[in-house]
Amino acid sequence: MARIKSAPVTYAELAKGIPKRRKAPLRALMDSLIAEGAIKIAQRHRRPHFVLPDYEPEPAYLLDMIRARSAVDDGGCLIWGGYIDPIRGPSVRAGEENPTSVRRMGWVASKRGRLGYSDTIVMKCGVDACVEVKHMKKAGRGDSTRNKSLSLLHRKKIAEARRKSGALTPERVREIRENNEVARIAAEKAGVSKGTIVDIRSGRSWKEYGGMSGLFTDLINRRAA
């Protein structure tokens, strides 16, 4: 534990010089310490290291890691050479947790300020793989996707996800359009507002997208999308 408290250490470093017969008990001890929460594993230089539970990588290490795994292009962008998540963008696994945004790591490590949950990083250069801190700008989560066109499949997925918690189904929407009930009565039966019924019947919401041999034919809430 003294070695781990002083600095992150690998299993090979701990086992160096230990007789072979004692390496199995050492591995069992490390596994038990991890299970108890006394230590954890963090990736450093792409190798697992034993660290304390409250360990946080030092800013200088994070910045060096980002530069080491990136390359500068002709436009001055620092192009990330690792995994690029469709939502998070350039990402890295800094421990046993889920992949972490490289841009958020770089922003904080460069002491540009703290980032709240509702904050996101947008790149002024517009390059998807860029992690150059000088090209970053803090924005709200809605700002990062505003004015971006969505594909038909993306709109369909968004609408389906939102409808899962709603009161309407594609079948119920078709029934609303086909009957002649007044909007107020139809709204009471469906458990939605009168305005929703009006929007459905006028085509402002739950638009039917067809084509492509019926592959994506479905009712999609255009307003939600």
Image (cartoon, grey):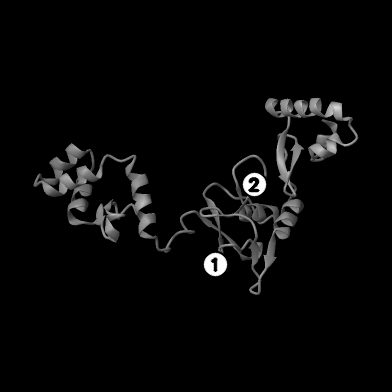
The quarter of the picture where the C terminus appears is: bottom left
Q: Position of residue 11 (x, y in %)?
A: 79, 37
In percent of the image, x 84 and y 35: which residue is there? 14
Q: Is residue 8 visible?
A: yes
Q: CA distance from mark 2 to mark 1?
A: 24 Å
Q: Amino acid at mark 1?
A: Gly
Task: Residue lying at the far front in this picture: please name it.
Answer: 20
Residue 189's quadrant in the figure? top left
To which residue does mark 1 refer? 126
Residue drawn at the location 37% of the way across and 56% of the way down: 153
Question: Is 95 located above or below residue 106 in the figure?
Answer: above
- Up the image or down, 213 lies above or below 95; here it is below
Residue at x 81% of width, y 35% of height: 4
- The amino acid pointed to by label 2 is Arg
State yes or no: discs 2 and 1 in contact (Cβ < 8 Å). no
Quarter containing the N terminus: top right
Labels 2 and 1: the sequence-earlier one: 2
Instruction: Depth check: give the residue in front, 18 or 198.
Output: 18
Q: Secondary structure at mark 1?
A: loop
Instruction: From the top left corner, tell me how far across and down residue 96 is, in percent.
Output: 65, 39
- Report which residue position mark 2 lands on: 93
Residue drawn at 68 percent across, 61 percent down? 70
Is 14 positioned to the left or the right of 165 in the image?
right
Query: What is the crowding at mark 1: few (fewer than 14 residues within 10 Å), some, or many (at least 20)?
Result: few
Using the image, determine if residue 37 lies above or below residue 142. Answer: above
